[in-house]
Image (cartoon, rainbow, N blue to C red):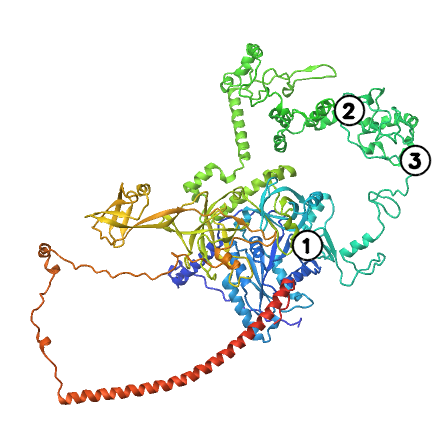
Amino acid sequence: MEDQSHKPHRKAKEKKQQSGDRNPKAFAVSNPGKLARQAARSSDIKEKRLHVPLVDRLPEEAPPRLVTIVGPPGVGKTTLLKSLIRRYAKETLSEPQGPITVVTSKKQRLTFVECPNDLEAMVDMAKIADIVLLMIDGNYGFEMETMEFLNILSATGMPGNIFGVLTHLDLFRKPQGLKDAKKRLKHRLWRELYAGAHLFYLSGVINGRYPDREVHNLSRFLSVMKNPRPLIWRNNHPYSIIDSVRDVTHPTAIEADEKCDRTVALSGYLRGTNFSAEGQRVHIPGLGDFTVKSMEALPDPCPTPQMEQAIAKATGKTGRRRLDEKEKKLHAPMSDRSGLKIEGDAIWITREKGFNFDKDDVEGERGEGEELIVGLQGERKLLGQTEDGMQLFRGGEKISSVPEEEDTGRKKPRSARFAEREENDDDLPEDEGFGSGEDDENEDGVSDEEAEFDEKKLGSMFRKEADKAGKEEDVAFADSDSDLGSLSGDDDEEVDSEDDFDDEDDEEAAALRWKDNLTERAHKLHGNRPSYRTADLARLMYNESLTAEEILKRWKGEVDEAEESEEDIEADSEDEEFFKKTKQEKDDSTSDDRPIPVYDYEQLEAKWSTPDNVELLRQRFTTATLGAGDGEEGDDDFDGFGDDDDEGDGEFEDLETGEQHKAEPKPAMSLEEERARNAKRKEELKLRFEEEDREGFSNDKANARREAGNDAEEFGEDDWYDAQKALIQKQLDINKSEFEALDERQRVAVEGYKAGKYAKIIIESVPAEFVDNFNTRLPVIVGGLAPTEDRFGYIQVRIKRHRWHKKILKTNDPLIFSLGWRRFQTMPIYSTTDSRTRNRMLKYTPEHMHCFATVYAPLIAPNTGFVCFNSFSSANPGFRIAASGTVLSVDESTEIVKKLKLTGAPYKVYKNTAFIKDMFTSSLEIAKFEGAAIKTVSGIRGQIKRALSKPEGHFRATFEDKLLMSDIVFLRAWYPIKPHRYYNVMTNLVGSWQGMRLTGEVRRDQGIATPMEKNSKYRTIERQTRHFNALKVPRALAAELPFKSQIVQMKPQKHKTYMQKRAVVLGGEEKKARDLLQKITTIRKDTDAKRRAKKEEKRAEFRKKMALMGEKKEAREKREKKEYWEREGRKRKAGDEGGGGKRRR
C-alpha cells in the first residue's frame, strides 16, 4: 500500500480571458427576493449580538463558579454530586453537605451546592447560581418542583448556563420507549428555556456513582464554559455563600444566658462587587439584616495553580507545571471528608472497617480523621519537643538538657512596665544584656531570683531615674538579639562575670563601632524620601490626633514621623496625667481654619517698609518682568520673604572650613527668551493636567457632545458598540491604575474587600436559635445591601398572577415577596390606571393581565424582578408561585383611590331644582362637595349647590330636567387609601416561621364558626311594578310637528265590524271529519304512552347495571391510588434521608 502510485490530477482548463468592458447585466442579481432575505437575516444575526454594555466586575482572581444541583427528591442529586467530586478531586465523600469547592483547571474552580427540596432554599439559590444542573427523572417526567424552580429563575434572573440531566433511564425496557421519552423531555425543556438547551443523559448507577464516561462528558462542559453575561443584580451587590459557620461568642456570656445573642464567624468566597471595609450592611436570607462587625481576608483554602505560581514567583520558589492528582485540591468544611467532619464544636470521625490505633502500622491506609486520633493517642509533648530533645526551629540545634545552674528564666509572671526615654538614653549599664545568673545580689541588695526582672537588661527605654544616677561611663550597645549573641548556656560561659566582660571590652567596642552615628547615616540615606505621596496623605488625613498643620508638614516631608514619635516618648513621664488631651484640643492660634489669622502687626510693618521686600513682591506679578532688563529674574519659584535657606540657588556654607560659596548669578534673559520659557512651561502644565484628568470619556465636554448628537461623526454605525465597550474598559483601567498606587491596607479602606477573596465575616446579635438549629443542607447567603436599601417606603410594582396558580389574589391579603436578597411578608394593594389620571384600587387581580400593586417594603432599584408566594409549605398540593413581576418605582408616599358612591333621594322637587336628603350627615360634608357632579339612575345630570340650614345633611341641587320623586340620586367620589405598613421578614433559619394568616384560616384552625351579618346575607329583592302615565302631547305642539313626526291616533269605532258580528256553524260532513280526527289523535297518544313506559323499564335495568360497574371502578381506583401513594411515600422518605439514586417503582 505504501508503494502505490496515485494517478496524477488532470490539469484544469484555462479560463478564457474576458475581452472588452465588464457587462453589468451579466452579473445582475438573479433572485432579488432571496438576496433581500439573506441581507435581513444577516442584519438580524448582527443585531442579536448587540446588547447594552455592562461593566464586567469579575476580578483577575475570580471566585469559584457556583454550580447548583436542583431537583425533586429521589432523582439522584447526591449521587451526581459524589460522582462529580470523584471526577475532579479523586476523593469520595460519604455525606456531601454544604458548599464543596474543587480545582478544575489551571485558572478555574467550581463550587458545588446541592439544593434541598425546600422552596426557601430554591429561591435563595436561584439568586446566586452561576450554573444550574436541573435533575429530571426520565422515567417520570417533569415534576412540580422543577417547574417552580424554572419560574423562579425567569423572575429573579436567568443564569446563562442551565443544563438538564436525565436520570433513571435504565428503567426503560424498550429502546424505542427510551428514545421517545428523550425526545419528548428535550422538547419540553426547550419550551421552558430556549431551543437548543443542553440535555445530558445518565443511564444507571454503578457502585454508587454514575458511569465515568457520562460524568466525564458533563464535567467537560462545566470546565470549558465561558463567563456568561453578568446579571444586573449580582453586578451591583456584594454577596457570598457561606461554607463555614462558627460560634465565637464568649463562653461566659453563654453560661450566663443560653439564649443570649451570639457572635458568629461566617467564612466564604466573596462575590459580586466589593464589600465595604467598615459598616457594611448585609442581609442573610432567613435570618435578617445585620451590620458586619469586622472582616478579615483569609488565605485561600483552595487556590488555583495559577495563584500558586504567582505566590511562588513572588517568594522565589519554583511552581508546578501541571495539575497532578495530588494537587487536585478539595475544600469541603461541612462534609465528611476522609472520615473527618467538623460540625460546630464537635468533630466526627468515622470509618467503615473500624479503627486501628497502632501508630507503628504503616501498611494500612488511614483517613484524615484516623490520623488525627492516632496522633492524639501518644504521650503529651510540649511545643518543639522531640524524642532527641527540644528543637524550636527547623534546622536549629536540638537541646537535650539544660543544667540547673544555668536556668536563668523568670520564676513568676512579668508585670506591666511603662516605657520611658530620657536625655541620657545613650548611657547604658556596664552589664547591659550580659548579667550572669551567678550574681548573688544586685546594687539594691535584692537577688535576681526574687526580682521580677533585671531592669538593666531592658535598655534605656524602660529605666527609671534612680537606676541611671550612678552610671559613670558609656559603652556601645546592641540593638538586636543577634548582636548580643546567643542567650543559651554555651554563650553564657564566656560572659560569666564582670571581669571577663572588662577583658573583652575593647574587642566588643571594635565590633560595634560600625554602629556609630547610625541615626545621621540613616537620615542621609533615607531622609530625602519623596514627599507629596498620595498614600501618606490618605493615611494622615484620618489620624485624629494630628492637626491640619502637622498633617501638611508631614506630607511635605518637613517633619519626620519617627523623630516626632521619639520626641513624644521623651516628653512623656510618669508624673504627668494618665489621660492627655489630643493635639487638636490645644490652642489653634496657628491653625489655617481660623476666620481671622493672628499676625504680629509690628513685624509686618517693619518687614514691608524695606524697598527690597517691596521689589520682591512686585516681581510676583506677571507684568513685573516684562520691562526687566537689569538682570532681574521673573522666576516663579518664590518661597517667601525672610527665608535664609538658599540651598536651592546653589548657596551653601562648608561647615568644615567655614568657607561660604555664593551662587553664580544667572544671565539676564531677553523678552523673547522669557516668552519662550513661559510658553514651554504652559505646555508642560497642559500635559500634566491631561495626565491627571482621570475622568476619561466621562468629562463634561464629552457628555455635552454626546447629548447634542454629535457622537455619530466620531463613530460609524458599526463602531459605536465597540466604542462604548472601550469607554468602559478605559474607566476600569483608570480605576485599576489609581488603586495600585495604594498599599494593601489603604486599598481595603478605600476600595473594600474585592471579589475572589476568601474572607471571614464577624456578625453580632445573631439569635441563639440560628446556632442551635443550624442545618448544613440549607444554604447560608450573606448579601450586601446598598445604602438606600435600608430605608422603607412604598414600592409600586407591575404584577401578574401566575397562570398555574389556582386562586386569584385579593387586595390586603398577606403575600410573601422574594425581592432582592430579602424574603418578607407584606399586604399589597392592587390598582389600575384610569386614563393615566388616577390609580384606582382593584379588589382582585385581573385574569391574564398585568396590574399595579403598591407594597410597604425596603426601597429597591427599579426593574428588579420578584416572585410571590402564598405559602412555602410543601403541604400545599398546587403550584406554589402565586405571581411575579418587576419594580416600577419607589416613593415615600403613594396615591391610590377607591371608588365611593353616595346615594340620596329627593323630597322636594321643583322645575329644575330639588332638595336631596339621606346623602350626607352634616353641612360640613356638604360644604366639602359643593360644585360636585351628581346624577340620577335615569341619567339626569346635576350639581350640588348649597346646604340647607334647617334639616341637617340636606342640600339643594340643580338638574338639567325635572326629577321624579322616585328617582335615586348618587354622587361618584374617590376615597384615598394607603397600604398597611406591614413588613414581616422570613426567619426560617431560626426555626419554623409562621406568617400572618387570613381570618378564614384562623377560624378554620380554631374551629370558630363564621359569623353571619344581617347586611351580608343575600336576599331576594322585591320590586313593585311601576305604572307610568301615558305620554300626553299638547295639541299646539302636535300641530307644529312635521308630517313625518306627527302622532296618528284613530278614534275607537262605535259599531261592531263584519268579522265581529259573523257566526261559524258546522255542517254534517265537517262535523264527522272533526270527530274522526279527534279519535285518531287520542289512540295515537295512548300508544305513545305505552311505548315510553316500556322503554323506561329497560332504562332502569341499564342504570342499575351501570351503577354496579361504577362502584367496582371506584373501588379499583381507590386501591390503585393507595398503592401509588405508598410507593411515592417510600420514595420521598428516602429522598429526605439524603438518599439519591435509583427510584423504586
Query: What residue would you read off at disc 2?
Result: 517
Identify the secondary structure beneath mark 1.
loop
Identify the secondary structure beneath mark 2.
loop
Q: Which mark is residue 405?
A: 3
Tell which circle, 2 or 1, labels the residue nearer the N-terminal end: 1
- Is residue 845 or residue 370 the one in the foreground? 845
Q: Quadrant of residue 217?
A: bottom right
x and y percentages locating residue 190 in the rendered image: 51, 63
Mark 3–mark 2 Cα distance, whole angstroms, equals 39 Å
In the rendered view, tell whether residue 185 sits above or below residue 515.
Answer: below
x and y percentages locating residue 348 in the rendered image: 73, 56
**Placement of the N terminus among the 4 image quadrants:** bottom right
The answer to whether residue 624 shows anywhere in this view is yes
Query: What residue would you read off at disc 1?
Result: 334
Between marks 2 and 1 in the image, the one whose residue lies nearer the viewer? 1
Mark 1–mark 3 Cα distance, whole angstroms, equals 53 Å
- Is residue 973 or residue 1133 the one in the foreground? 973
